[in-house]
Amino acid sequence: MSAINQPQPDPTASLLAGYQPLPSVADELLDPGGNLRPVWRSFIDGLASLPADELTRRFEQGDQYLRDAGVFFRQYGEKDATDRAWPLAHVPVLIHDSEWTQISEGLIQRAELLETVCADLYGEARLVREGHLPASLIAMSPEWLRPMVGVRPRSGHFLNFIAFEIGRGPDGQWWVLGDRVQAPSGAGFALENRVATARVFPDLYANSNVHRLAGFFRAFRDALNDLRGDSESRVGILTPGRLNDTYFEHAYIARYLGFMLLEGEDLTVENGQVMVRTIAGLSPVSVLWRRIDASYADPLELNETSRLGTPGLVEAIRRGKLAMVNALGSGILETRAMLAFLPRICQAMLQEPLKMPNIATWWCGQESERAHVQANAHRMMIGSALSTRMPFDPEGSTVLGSSLQTGPGGIVDTLLDAEARLLVGQEAVTLSTTPAYVDGKLVPRPMSLRVFLARTSRGWKVMPGGYGRIGRTQDAAAIALQRGGSVSDVWVVSDKAVRNETMLPSPTSPYVRSQLSVLPSRAADNLFWMGRYVERAEGLIRLLRALNIRLAESGRADTDLLNYASEFPGLLGADPTAGVPQDLFDAIASATVSATVVRDRFSVDGWAALNELAASARDDLESIAPGNASARALGTLLRQITGFSGLVHDNMYRFAGWRFLSIGRSLERASAMAQLLSWFAAPDAPEGALDLVVEVGDSVLSHRRLYAVATTRPTVIDLLACDANNPRSIHYHLAEIHGQVGFLPGAKEGKQLSPLASTTFKMHADLAVKKPEQLDSNGLLQIRSELGGLSDLLTSTYLR
Amino acid sequence: MLYDIGLRIAYTYASPAVGSRHVLYLTPADLPGRQRAITSLLEITPSPDERIARSDFFNNTLVEAVFRASHAEIVFRLRSRVERLPDTRTSDPSPLLPGLASEIASNRSLAPDAPHHFIADSPRVRALPEFGAYARSHIAPDMTVLRIVETIGQALDRDMKFDPDATDVSTPPEEAFASRHGVCQDFTHIMIGCLRAIGIPAGYVSGFLRTNPPPGKPRLEGADAMHAWVRAWCGAETGWVEYDPTNGIFVGVDHIVVAHGRDYGDVAPVRGVVRTAGAQDSTQAVDVVPLA
C-alpha cells in the first residue's frame, strides 16, 4: 500500500484538535457544542493551510512593520519607563457584522446617555435634584470641574469622540466594562494593529470581507473640520508631549488626519481666541482634539501645578471661541461609581433600559449598597469609587474580594469603616476567550475590546473594528488582564463584499491643495536643533575616527599630534584616545529627543534610521577599545549617519520645517569647521594637523585635485573656509544659511531685509571677500561667535 | 459698621515678564443681609491689554487681567467702601455630630453653598489622620456641631502660635500643624482639615480685618495683610457659620468677606501665570478704617 491512498488529515481539524475552551466561559471561536462558529471558518481554514515556518515568517513581517513604524509599548517599572516591542497577537478577533450591528446599537444608546448626563451635570443638575445621582459623589470627584459648570459647549455637544471597553459574559451577552470619555486612546493603535495584521495575512484579509476603518476616520476628520465654523482657523490635536505613554499615537493620528500636533506651550489666548505661535506669527485655532487630561489644560483655572496647559483656555471655551473635544470636565463620566447609577438614569432620562448592560456596581457611600458589598465581598472586585481606570488596569488598585480577608473584622470591613464613600464593589466578571497562537498551536485566551465612537454630521458612528486586549494566561477573570498580555486587531466580517475605503478623496473629485500647513514655532525649534545635533554627532564621529586611525597607526597615545588634539576645545576635555566621549552619545540622544517632538512632521523612514543610529551607537561604541576597533565602528556609524542625512536632504519636501533643519545643519557645520581650523590649522599646530583637518572635512580628494601640492595652511583655509563650492566649507554654508533665511516669513519687507536676513547677508559677504591669508585663528573664532549670535537671533525671530 | 478699605499689592520681576495672565480675588463681596459692597475701584498698573470681570462657581466676583507687552512690575490698587451688618444668630439649633451625615445626604443640590463641595479633600487640604485625631481629642458626645466648631477653633488658637516667618504661601497645612506655627492661611487650612476629618463640611473665606481695634480691645492678628478664616456647615437649619481660628472668635463686624472657596487655591488674592525667566518679589499693604 502506498501512502498516497492514506486519507490526508484535515489541516483545520488538526489545528483545532488541542483547542479546549474553559468550562463556563464563552468562546469566540467555538460554540457551546464545540463547533467552529461560521464567522471564523474561512480564516481558520486559511490559517491551517499555512505551514508553521511560513506563519512564523509572516508574524515576523508584521512585527517588523511595527518596529519600523516606531510603534512600541511603554512599560512603567519600579524605577523608570522602558519601551518594549509592541505586543501584537497576530490572530485577529473576528466578529460577524450582524452581531456588530447589535453591539453598535447598544453603544450608540450609551453614547447618547452619557451626553445627556454630562449636559445635566454641567447644567441644571436635575439628576442630583431628583435623586438619581448622589450630590456628594459628584462633588468629591476631582473630575467634576467647577469652572466648567454652566458653560455650554460651542458645538452644542459635550462628547464627540469616546470609547467603550466591552467584554462577553458566560451567557454570550456583551457587557460594558468601562466608559472612556476624557481623552480615549487606542484608535491610532487600532489602525496600526490593522496595518500590521493585514501584512501578516494579506490574502485572508483581502478575501474575508473585513469592514475597513478609513471611512470612520474620514467622517471624524470631516466632523472636526466642520466644528471650526469657518475656513480660516485650524484644528489641532493637543498632546501632553513626548513623555506621555501614548505620545506615539498622538503623532500618528495627527499625521494620519492631517492636523497640527500641539502642546500647551504652542498656544496663547488673545481676546478669548486660541492662537498657535508659528514662525509666521499667531494663527487662530478653533478646535482642539485633546489627548491631555482636562485638569492639566489650563493652569490658571484648573490644576495650578500643570506645566502642560495654556492659561486662558477655559476662558476661550467660555466665550464660545474654542470647541474642545471632548468637553473639559467630561471625565466625570469615567468615574467608576457612575456605573452603579447609569442603568436607572437610562430609564429616567431616555425612558428605556440599557441595551447593553454595564458590570453590576455598588457604591459604598450609600447604606444599603455598602451592606451588600460587605456581605458579598468575596464575589466582587473592590476598588476606588473615584478611579477612572479600568478594573484590569495594572496601575489601578482594584482587588478581588476573594483575595481579601472578608467577614467581621476583616480588611474589607476595616476599609469600609474608614472610607466607604471612596469604595465600590463590582461583580467579578468573566470574559470570553478567543484563539491566540502560542507555540505553534491555538489556545483560548480571555479578551476584551475597546470600541470607538465618533460624532459625525449624521450622528454617532462606530468604528467597525477596535482594539482587542488578549490575556496572557487562561485565567478568564477580567481582572487578570492587570497582568498584561497582548493586543490584537478586530475584524468585523460581512457575508458580502465590503467597500474598500481610504482616507483620500476619490480620484474623480476635483484636485485641491489642502490648506497650507503652518509651522508652530516649537516644532521649528526642534527641527533646527535636530539639524544641529545630527551634524554635531557627525562632526564628532569624523574627528574621533581620524584620531583613532592615528592612534592605531602609531600604536601610542602620546604623539605630538594626539597630545595636541586632546587639548582641542571641541572635545570639551574628553580624551579622544580613551574610548568614545560622552558628548557623542549626548548629541545623538538630543537629536532623537528633538525628532520625537516633531514626529508628526517627519518621515517614518527618517525616524527609523535615527533610532537605528542611536541603537548602534549604544551597542557598538559604549565600551569599545580605542584604536583600530573604534575606528572601524565609528566608520560604520558614519555611514549610517550620512545615510540619515541623505534621506532627510533628498527626500523631505522643502516645507518651512525643512529649512529650519537645514539652517541648523549648516550653522553647526560652519561653526564646527571654524573651530577645527582655528585649532588644527593654527601656525603652531604639530605636523599632521593640517592633513587631519582635511580628512575630518572629508576633502582629501578635493585637496589633491585642486592644489596638487601637500597641505599648507593657505590651501587648507582656502578649501575649508573660503571655497564657495565645497559643501564642507564655511563659505558654502554661510551662503546656504543666507539662501534659506530668504525663504522664511518676513525675510523681506519691500526692499528692506529683516535684521536676520541682513545679518546673514553681511556674514556671507564678509567671508566672500576674504583671502585665506587674511583669515587667522582669531578671525575664524570671530566667525564662530557670530554664528552663535545668529542662532540667538533666529531663535528670537521665529522660535519663541 | 461702615469701612473704607485700601489695598496695594505689587509684583516686581527680576527679568521682565513677557506676557502674563492673572485672576484677582480682591474686591469685597456683596452678601445680602450680611455685607453691602458700596463702591469698589480696582486700579491695575500698567493698564492690562484685557480686563475681564466675571463671577466663579462659588459666586465670587473676580477680575482677570491679561498683559501681552513685557513688564517689570505690576501694581494692583483697591479702594472700597463696605457696610458690614451684624449677625443675628442667637440660638444653636445645630445637630449632634452623628446626626449631621444624614442632613448632608438629604441635601440634593450642587449649588455653590451646598455642603457637598466642602467634605472631600481639596487640592490644598487633606483630612489627614493627625487632624482627625486632634479634632476628636477635643470634642465630647454632647456637643452640637456649632459647639464643636467653636471648640476646635479655640483649641487651635490656643495651641498654635501666630508667626509670619514660619511658613509661606505654599507650606502644606500638615507642616504648619506639626510645628504649631503659622499665619491665618495655615490656621484656616488646619481647622478645615480637622472639621472635614470628623465629617463637618468646611471651607475657606478670604477677606479683610479691621486694622485698628475699637477702644479698649486688643489689635487682632493678621490685620496687616489680607486675612482668612473658616466657614463650616452646621446642619440644614443653622447653615454656614464663620469662625476665625487665628483670633479664636466667631466672625463678626470686624471681618469683611472677599471670597468663599474650598481652600486658599480657589480664592488666592492674586493667581497668575507669568512667562518670565527670573525671580519675582511681592509686597502687600492693607488699610481697613471704620467710618465712625
Image (cartoon, coloured by chain):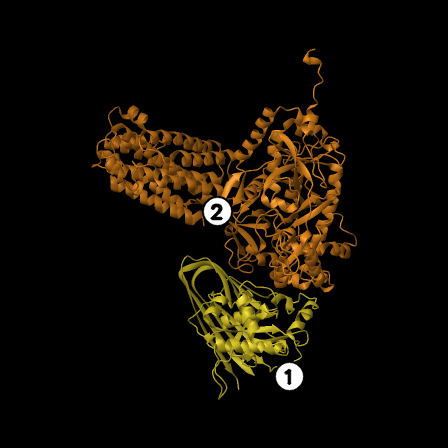
Chain colours: A orange, B yellow
Q: Amino acid at mark 2?
A: Asp
Residue pushed farthest right?
A351
Please tell me which residue lies in front, A503 or A442. A442
Please tell me which residue lies in front, A637 or A257. A637
Residue contact between numbered discs 2 and 1, judged by CB atoms under 8 Å: no
Disc sitting over residue A385 in the figure = none
C-alpha distance separating marks 2 and 1: 61 Å
In the displayed structure, A632 sits above or below B276; it is above
Please, what secondary structure does the residue beneath circle 1 have? loop
Mark 1 surroundings: few (<14), some (14-19) or many (≥20) residues within 10 A: few
Residue A771 left/right relative to A116: left
Which percent across, then down, holds residue A566?
A: 27, 38
Residue pushed farthest bottom?
B216
Residue for badge 2: A80
Residue pushed farthest left?
A684
Report the chain holding disc 1.
B
Residue for badge 1: B90
Report the chain holding disc 2.
A
Residue A787, located in which quarter of the rendered image?
top left
Please tell me which residue lies in front, A66 or A676. A66
Residue B150 left/right relative to A524: right
Please, what secondary structure does the residue beneath circle 2 have? loop
Judge whether residue B25 can be spotted in this image.
no
Mark 2 surroundings: few (<14), some (14-19) or many (≥20) residues within 10 A: few
Residue A378 left/right relative to A554: right
Which percent across, then down, holds residue A746?
A: 46, 45
Judge whether residue B237 can be spotted in this image.
yes
User: For the point 51% across and 53% down, which residue is it?
Assistant: A308
Q: Which tag is nearer the camera, tag 2 or tag 1?
A: 2
Q: Amino acid at mark 1?
A: Thr
In the displayed structure, B279 sits above or below A59; it is below
Which percent across, then down, holds residue A56?
A: 58, 27
